[in-house]
Amino acid sequence: MKLADRNQIQVPKQYQIALEVMGVLDVAKLLYQIPNFSDHPKGNGEPIIVLPGFATNDHVTYPMRKYLEFLGYRAEGWDLGYNHGIVPKLLEEFQIRLERTYQKYGRKVNLIGWSLGGYIARESARDNQDKISKVISIGSPLIGGPKYTSIANYYAKKQNMNLDDVEKEVDERYNRPLEMPLLSIYSKNDNIVSWESSIDHFSPNIKHVEVNATHLGLILNPDVYLQIAQFLQNVNTG
């Protein structure tokens, strides 16, 4: 989607953030589905790093990592503490983190990121394509950076940035294509990130999957978990 085509993107309003309280329903759904996890596609010891969203840390990705471990993956947190949203600094720090895991297991690493964590995962993969197997983004703004989110103005003020300039920089990054398999999971009930900004029109090996969840609920949604397991196995065995 080019810059000229983005005027029609429906950006969530600030007041919609209050609707994110409905994410508690995803916790209930997840607990209800736990007995079915044994039927989900299994892994074979592949390393995975799970990246948290803006203003969160590894605590929020703990349930997902335990799920992945249950399936047979070596799932780790990003170990960088609070996601403060300063992307250049986080990419630099995550470069060291990624290299450590790559050397530890001696094989390519899978990256899974929620919200801003998904964007960081993809951009780290873009710079380290020889070390990455697959990348999964969950409710992540893949175009426009923070521009098409309900917290755009807050984020821009906090980071002292121009949203239009950031959008152009994000687009320029696509001049170096992501060659590995990619999955973008999104929800039209996301009250923070516009679902349209989660659609990647540039990358050759991208798959998009829609689920029903709030933005906060995406990290705990059982449908998201199943989509992740299926994507990882299908790519591994396909």
Image (spheres, rainbow, N blue to C red):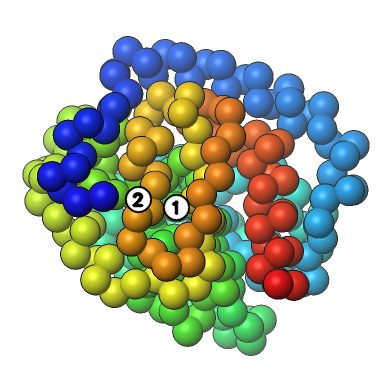
**Along the line of sight, which residue is nearer the eye, 145 or 67?**
145
Query: On residue 67, which mark appears?
Result: none
**Along the line of sight, which residue is nearer the eye, 150 or 203?**
203
Disc 2 to disc 1, C-alpha distance = 8 Å
Residue 83 in sight: no
- Label 1: which residue? 118
Q: Residue at x 71, y 64 (%)?
A: 234
Within-10-Å neighbours for mark 1: few <14, some 14–19, many 20+? many
As drawn, is 122 to the left or to the right of 233? left
Choose top left, top right, bottom left or bottom right for residue 93.
bottom left
Choose top left, top right, bottom left or bottom right for residue 87.
bottom left
Q: Position of residue 75 (x, y in %)?
A: 67, 61
Relative to 59, say whether 46 is above or below: below
Relative to 234, say whether 35 is above or below: above
Residue 181 in sight: yes
User: Circle 1 sits in a helix, a strand or a loop, which is it?
Assistant: helix
Q: Residue at x 13, y 45 (%)?
A: 4
Query: On residue 142, which mark appears?
Result: 2
Name the kind of residue labelled 1 in the image: Gly
Question: The C terminus appears in which quarter of the rendering?
Answer: bottom right
Q: Position of residue 138 (x, y in %)?
A: 51, 45
Q: Residue at x 63, y 83 (%)?
A: 107
Q: Position of residue 180 (x, y in %)?
A: 50, 73
Q: Position of residue 135 (x, y in %)?
A: 52, 63
Farthest residue, direction front: 5
